[in-house]
Amino acid sequence: MRGELLRGGVAYLVLLGGAALTVAPLVLSALTALKSPRQFGADSPLALPNPWTGENFRLVLDQGLGRALVVTALMTACITLGQLVFSVLAAYAFARTEFPGRDALFWVYLATMMVPPMVTLIPLYLMFAKAGLLNTFWALVLPFVFGSPYAIFLLRQYFRGIPEELIGAARLDGASTLDVIVHVVVPMSRPVLATLTVITIVSQWNNFMWPLVASSGPRWQVLTVATANLQTEYDARWTLVLAATTLAIVPLVVVFLAFQRQVLRSISWTGLK
């Protein structure tokens, strides 16, 4: 019993240490954003703001970060919706539909995950330049909206675990393929869809390289690019940079808190499976 308690205590200490290392930079960023530049230069980085001020947030919003926040939210929402719709359709086809060369096509498509994004950056840029879509909203969205190998692989594996009897019963009731997807598969896949939603939102919210290449000027500037430009413009004003960073982190925290129960259910189901 003592050995089990000791092992449990050590495990909790390790987990608490990992949590502290993860949360500490976020807390330090938020505290620095609430300091004045004078206090940041004079006091220890660990000192509490004195006085507390929101001036840094007002300044970064005045510098165009508010527009970048809206553009990033619209881009992320469109890509996430497209990823869910097209990935569900493709994953169902690979998991439940019989057609010649299905498995070979799936593994070839999955193999594209091994291609570094930097390899396709220049060809993708040339394609959008020829189409006249650079520096538009569509340039930000189209490369990512039609699903991804990871999303399709994740959903395909989940769909294959759905009992065939349920799908067969829906077929006997006269349900079409689309009815089966909408009324049987999707409701049973809410945990994995929530997980995919969180993964997609985080990855697209933090996307930097393609938005940097595909857009110029402030009109379609996303949050990551705007923050990088802010750092270049105000190199000595780290309070402004960390205020922008804090604003960028808050929506991701809200998304995780909203979907955490479904994400945990997905992890639990995967472990049981």
Image (cartoon, rainbow, N blue to C red):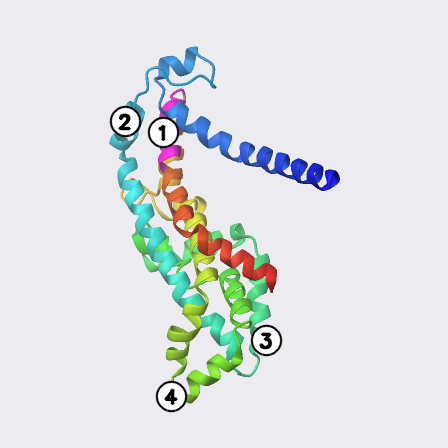
Q: Which residues are magenta?
A: 236-247
Give the number of the mark in front: 4 or 3: 4
First reached walking from the N terminus: tag 2 or tag 3 = 2
Whole-percent x, y for residue 125 in the image = 42, 53
**Residue under label 3:** 103
Q: Amino acid at mark 3?
A: Asp
First reached walking from the N terminus: tag 4 or tag 1 = 4
* Residues at marks 2 and 4, CA–CA distance in whole angstroms: 60 Å
Q: Amino acid at mark 1?
A: Ala
Label 1 SS: helix
* Residues at marks 4 and 3, CA–CA distance in whole angstroms: 28 Å
For the residue carrying disc 4, how many other residues have a C-alpha within 10 Å: few (<14), some (14-19), or many (20+)? Answer: few
Q: Amino acid at mark 2?
A: Leu
Callout 4 touching callout 1 (CB < 8 Å): no
From the image, which quarter does the N terminus lie in?
top right
* Residues at marks 2 and 3, CA–CA distance in whole angstroms: 54 Å
Of 170 and 97, the residue lying toward us: 170
Mark number, residue 59: 2
Quarter of the image for residue 48 reads top left
Callout 2 touching callout 4 (CB < 8 Å): no
**Residue under label 1:** 243
- State whether residue 234 appears in this view: no
Label 3 SS: helix
**Residue under label 4:** 174
Callout 2 touching callout 1 (CB < 8 Å): yes
Label 4 SS: loop
From the image, which quarter does the C terminus lie in?
bottom right
